[in-house]
Amino acid sequence: MPTATASQTIGPYWHLIEHKEWADLTRFGAEGERIEVTGRVTDGAGAPVADAAVEIWQASPLADERFPGYGRSATDGEGRFRFITLKPQPVAGHGNQTQAPHLSIVLLARGLMTALRTRLYFEGEALNETDPLLSSIEDPVERATLIARSTGPGVWTLDIRLQGEGETVFLEV
Amino acid sequence: MSDTLPFRPFAAGTQPPLDAPAYGSTHLRHPKRALRKLAQTVSETTGPHFTPALFPEINDLTKQASGEPLGERIIVAGQVTDEDGRPIPNTMIEVWQANAAGRYAHPRDMHDAPADPNFPGEGRIFTDTEGRYRFVTIKPGAYPWRNHHNAWRPIHIHFSLFGTGFAQRLITQMYFPGDPLLNLDPIYHAVSDAAARERLVSRFDLAITEPEWALGYRFDIVLRGRGATPFEDGGHH
C-alpha cells in the first residue's frame, strides 16, 4: 500500500486560489461571540512573511451550514493575517481531560516544504493552566508563543515567528 | 472507520524536511527548534467539510473567460485514497497553475512571458463517491526562478487537499512524465525517498485521453491513514 503523498511548497503564487471572504467565518450567518484574530508572521531575520497562507480550524463551535469552522487569510505586506470568527469553547481532550479554547493553525508559504502547525489560545482563560498542551511546555516564554493577547474589545493578537528569537512553538501532529 | 481516530505518523523519508538547504527560501523560514509532538485530539482528527453548494466547482479551467486559453488542452484525473486504500469521497481539491507560457495570473509574477487573459489558472473539484476526480485544463509552461543560476521549475500543477481531518491537510505539486527539469529541481528532490518522489509525477493515460480532443494524465493522491497500521513493517520502530 503506498504511503501518503509527499508535501511540496505552496509557493509564492497561491493567491490564484485566494478568496478574501474565506477569512470571515461568520459570512454564512453564524451567530455567537464574534471575535477578530490577527497577528504578524515574521522570518528568522525579523522580516515580514508577506506571501503566507494562514489557515485556522476550530472544533468549537461545531461546524455546520452557517459556520464552516475553517478560514484562510493571506498575509499582507507587513506579514499580517486577520480572521473574523466565533470564540471557541473548551473541547474534550484525551481521557477525561479538557482542552482550553483554541484554534488550530496551519501555516503555508514559499520556503515551507510542509505545512507548519501551531495553535492559538486565549489569554486569561482559566483552563489554560490545565490544558494538556500548554501545561506540557515548561518554558513560559515558549508557552507564551501560543497565547493570543487581548488588544481591544473582541480583538485577539498573536504574532508568529518562524525562526530565531521568540520562535513560535510548532507542532508535529 | 471512526472520524476521530488519530492519523498515523508519516513513513520516514516520504515527506520533505523543513530545512532543505538547496531551496534557498527555506533558510530563514524553517524553525530551528524541533517540532513539539502533540497527541492528536478532536482539533486534529476532525476538519472542515466543503460542499459545491457553498464552494462552486471549477472543473474546466479552459472555460473561465470569454475566450479559450492558448496552449495544449489536457485532462487530469485520478483517485484520492488514504494509506489503507480507502477512497476519500466528496472531498474538495483546489488546483492552480501557470499558463501555457509559464506565467501565473498573479501581480507578483514578473517572468517575461505573455499573460493569457483567458486563463485565470484556478480550479476546484470534488471527488465522487469512489474518491475519483477529473478536470480539464491546459498544460502549464516551465518558468525560471531565482533559487540558483539558470534555475527553472519543472512544469507542475499545484494541488490542495483537506481530507477528513485537519491533520490530513496536504499541499503538493503534480509533475509531468519525462520532464528533463525534474532531476535539476531542489523542491522535487527535497523528498529523499525515491518512490515517494516519483509518485509526484503523473502518468500519461490513454484511458483518460479523449480522441480528437485532449491527452489525459493520471495523478493519484494518498492521504494519511487513520488508526494503527494494518500490517507490521518489521523492526522499523
Image (cartoon, coloured by chain):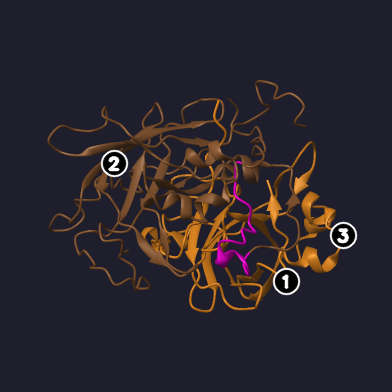
Chain colours: A orange, B brown
Q: Which residues are magenta?
A: B14-29
Report x, y in % for residue B28: 63, 70
Front position in the image: A51 or A57: A51
Spatial CA span between label 3 and label 2: 49 Å
Q: Chain of mark 1?
A: A
The answer to whether residue A90 is magenta is no
Q: Secondary structure at mark 2?
A: strand
Q: Residue type at mark 1: give it.
A: Gly
Q: Residue at x 42, y 34 (%)?
A: B220
Please state the chain letter of the residue tagged with numbered disc 2 in the rendered image.
B
From the image, tell me which residue sits under label 3.
A138
Are both tags, 1 and 3, on one chain?
Answer: yes
Q: Quadrant of the N terminus of chain A?
A: top right
- Count all numbered tags in the image, as a single digit: 3
* Position above or below: B36 against A162: above
Helix, strand or loop under label 3: loop
The image shows residue A98 at horizontal and vertical percentages of 76, 46
Give the spatial CA distance, label 2 vs label 1: 42 Å
User: What is the CA distance from the residue labelled 1 to the residue labelled 3?
Assistant: 19 Å
Disc 3 marks which amino acid?
Answer: Glu
Residue to which mark 2 is pinned? B135
Query: Which of the two labelled residues, at mark 1 and mark 3, occupies the earlier sequence position?
Result: 3
Name the residue rendered at 75%, 56% in the picture.
B34
Q: Residues within 10 Å of mark 1 (few under 14, many from 20)?
A: some
Residue that badge 1 annotates: A164
Mark 3 — on which chain does it sit? A
Q: Is residue A76 visible?
A: yes
Comparing labels 1 and 3, the label whose residue is closer to the camera: 1
Residue B21 among those drawn in magenta = yes
